[in-house]
Amino acid sequence: MQLARSTLSTAKQSNAWNKFQKLSFSVATLPSLPYGYKDLEPYISGEIMEIHHSKHHNAYITNLNAAMKNLQKAEAESDLSTIIKLQVAIKFNGGGHLNHSIFWKNLAPTSSGGGVLNEGVLKEKIESKFGSLEKLKDELSASSVAIQGSGWGWLAYDKVNKNLSIATTSNQDPLEATTGLVPLLGIDVWEHAYYLQYKNVRPSYTKEIFNVVNWKDVQERLIAAMKS
Amino acid sequence: MKVSAALLFALISDKTLAFVCPSGKVTMSAGGGVTRREALETSAVTIAAAGMGLLASSSPVRADGPYYLPDLPYGYEALEPSIDAATMKFHHDKHHLAYVTNANKAVSGKEAVSILDLQKNAIKEGTRNAGGGHYNHSLFWTTLCSESKSGSPSSALSSAINSSFGSMEEMKTKFNTAAAGVFGSGWAWIGVTKDGKLDITTTPNQDNPLMEGAKCTPMIPILGLDVWEHAYYLKYQNRRPDYISAFWNVVNWPQVSKYYEEYASKGAGVPVKG
């Protein structure tokens, strides 16, 4: 009887530990840029890249970690009201973290192939869906420019239709979580992404950014999305 | 680009032309918005500028509609160091102008109403972005002034602040938190609610509390703070809280007090030029 009881309490403890581990969120950390702050010049200034990465993205991470810690506490206390209240901060800061983590990889210096779309499945799909790379650029730029307030323009993969599509999200809403579309290429049109260099002329930014788009990364995301 | 004097006069008589003044200010004139005398005064400067080849290379902006860009009541540098001159220039001459242009497009073919009156149904009628943007900014410029002229709230407004928030400091703390907490683009507002008290609320993008359906506390705004990044980024970058603190240095309290006493406390929205 005693043995059974102690086995049962050990089992309970280990279940509790497993439950705790599942509840634990790995603290988010700021990913390094795959290039130097100035390496996307003259298309995106070093000043913008430094503030964008080390201040804005960093703040999303700090605030995400704080929100997740509060979530953990609320879950432990079964405080449903607080759990629900925290969703806004998690969506905003978590979305900010997801979006920017994609964004840094979506870009590459021209010296590393930024701006060049090579032959491959991405090029085929772009030409079949949009007619040409130039037409895709025009459409994605126009969609991004038209966003009112802050948000992102996306080239996405639609798993349902098995095709590329263009989408937009507002604020830091993460694309896949909110729409099911898989993000391939994001254009950040929050003013902080371009204002110091382009001021109010968002259309110039959404045109010039294509000079540093890392189409290799975009293709890798497409291939992964097509497989999943 | 040189423009002949004859052409300028022809355009003036049309009464639907905007001029780019050498100072960089844009004055829009459209049916009833600007008097012929004002348009002529502006044109005299413009003709001189044209003669010196000083006109901007962009073509004159046409204001095809009832709305126009109101002049700033002060120079671009008047709010320094709290709000920098470059920001004031871009914010007024580019951003606000775009809202005016788009507001005119949005109401094209419809009966003209004042920009204040456009706000109530802006969400229903699809004018929340351009129409809201035009109202919000037109109000905003008038609630700011150089630090030396900032003054303090009138006794009526002071009483209302104290009774609604406890004190001026408590009001500012609540406002600062709200303004810093806006996710994305938007505005923070102080206004008079239905029960006659002052309260603080925020709106996304170019919405304002006058709009039916706006997701905020309904109120008649007397003072707003633009927290779109374009409002502060050149000087403050990501440091929005620093911008919010500095804002208090350049609030035109006599004007805000007037808005409270003559309009909001009586249940009327604040009218603006434009």
Image (cartoon, coloured by chain):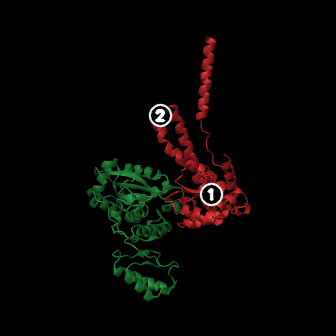
Chain colours: A red, B green
Mark closer to the chain start, 1 or 2: 1
User: Can residue A34 be seen in this snapshot?
Assistant: no
Q: Position of residue A38 (x, y in %)?
A: 67, 61
Which chain is home to disc 2?
A
Residue that mark 1 sits on = A50
Helix, strand or loop at label 2? It is loop
The image quadrant of residue B248 is bottom left
Please tell me whether residue B117 is drawn above or below residue A1 in the rendered image.
below
Residue that mark 2 sits on = A79
Please tell me whether residue B216 is drawn above or below residue A115 in the rendered image.
above
Q: Position of residue B79 (x, y in %)?
A: 44, 65
Q: Position of residue B34 (x, y in %)?
A: 35, 76
Give the residue type at disc 2: Asp
Residue neighbourhood size for the residue with mark 2, other residues' Cα within 10 Å, grouped as few (<14), some (14–19), many (≥20): few
Question: Exactly how many numbered labels are in the figure?
Answer: 2
Please, which residue is most extreme toward the top here? A1
Left or right: A80 in relation to A222: left
Query: In front: A46, or A16?
Result: A16
Please tell me whether residue B3 is drawn above or below residue B27 in the rendered image.
below
The image quadrant of residue A205 is bottom right
Q: Nearer the viewer, mark 1 or mark 2?
A: 2
Give the residue type at disc 1: Glu
Q: Position of residue A222 (x, y in %)?
A: 67, 52
Query: Looking at the image, which residue is at 52% across and 53% down?
Result: A171
Residue neighbourhood size for the residue with mark 1, other residues' Cα within 10 Å, grouped as few (<14), some (14–19), many (≥20): some
